[in-house]
Image: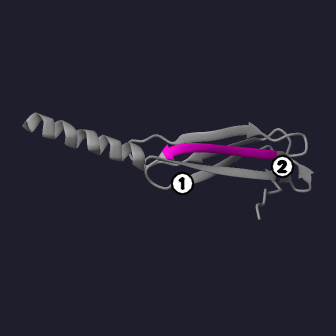
Amino acid sequence: MRLWQTILVYLFLCIGVCWAMRKQGVAVRGVLKCGAVPSNYSKVRIVDIDYGPDPDDTLDEKRTDERGRFEVSGTTHEMTPIDPVMYIWHECRDEQTVSLP
């Protein structure tokens, strides 16, 4: 009898954890420019930063088009709110900086 109680408690805990893992997502769309010139074919990546033993999740990665336009989006299942970060790899000249509003 005690074994069945332990199994039921374990089963309910597992079901609770599965329900707590909710789907969350993020999307970013924009135009990347190097000064007044579009930054074409630059790499853009969004990542969910995780802490502890859980590794970071790459949600999406794309390159800008010839006009510097990009659109990245992705989802993940997490128990806690996601911490999305966007990384940009570009080849702007050193005297110019990339500015985001």
Q: How far is disc 2 from disc 1 in space, using C-alphas?
A: 30 Å
Residue at 23% from the left image edge and 40% from the top image edge:
10
Residue 55: x and y in percent read 46, 40
Q: In the shown orientation, is residue 81 left or right of residue 67? A: left
Report the magenta residues as a range.
70-77
Give the residue at mark 2.
93
Residue at 39% from the left image edge and 47% from the top image edge:
52
Q: State which quarter of the image contains the C terminus.
A: bottom right
Q: In the shown orientation, is residue 55 left or right of residue 90? A: left
Chosen colour scheme: one colour
Mark found first going from the N terminus, 2 or 1: 1
Residue 42: x and y in percent read 79, 41
Residue at 76% from the left image edge and 61% from the top image edge:
100
- Residue 9: quarter of image: top left
Q: Few, some or many C-alpha atoms within 10 Å of disc 1 (few <14, some 14-19, many ≥20)?
A: few
Give the residue at mark 1.
83
Q: In the shown orientation, is residue 50 left or right of residue 74? A: left
**Amino acid, disc 1:** Asp
